[in-house]
Image (spheres, rainbow, N blue to C red):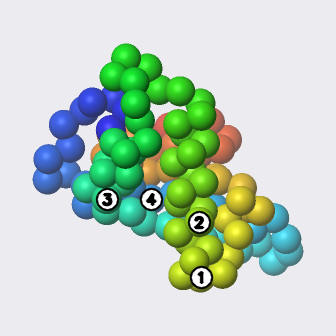
Amino acid sequence: MWTRYDVSGSVSATELVFSVLVEPRMDISYAIHVEDFETLWNDIHKSKDEVMLEEVDNLFQCLYSHYFRYFRIHLSATQLVKVTASVASTQCEGKVSQ
């Protein structure tokens, strides 16, 4: 979405993996359909030339609010450890894979 890479038919969801910072460690996987994610981003993103930090913060606040509404879990109290999108997957350790 941010790279403007055409994802037609390749991936049905963007997955965010959050880690709860208590023992025993628990991961929460949050999958969002590409179309829904893109619609939300288009509602937030105003500039065509660059991605603003405030826009990304707003995007995550919307996702956190949605998740809390249905599951009563504050994702803002967790750590985002992995993002899998159509182009690649990246982890908080800096590992990127295709």
- Mark 1 and 4 residues: CB-CB less than 8 Å, in contact? no
Dot 1 falls on a residue whose secondary structure is helix
Which residue is label 4 attached to? Answer: 15
Identify the mark nearer the N-term, 3 or 4: 4
Q: Tell me: 12 left or right of 84.
A: left
Residue 95 visible from this viewpoint: no
- Mark 4 and 2 residues: CB-CB less than 8 Å, in contact? no
Dot 2 falls on a residue whose secondary structure is helix
Frontmost of labels 3 and 4 is 3
**Relative depth, front residue between 22 and 73:** 73
Identify the mark nearer the N-term, 2 or 1: 2
Dot 4 falls on a residue whose secondary structure is strand
Q: Quadrant of the C terminus?
A: top left
Which quadrant of the structure image shows residue 13?
A: bottom left
Which residue is label 3 attached to? Answer: 36
Q: At which x and y percent is residue 87?
A: 33, 40
Query: Callout 2, which amino acid?
Result: Ser
Q: Residue furthest top?
A: 49
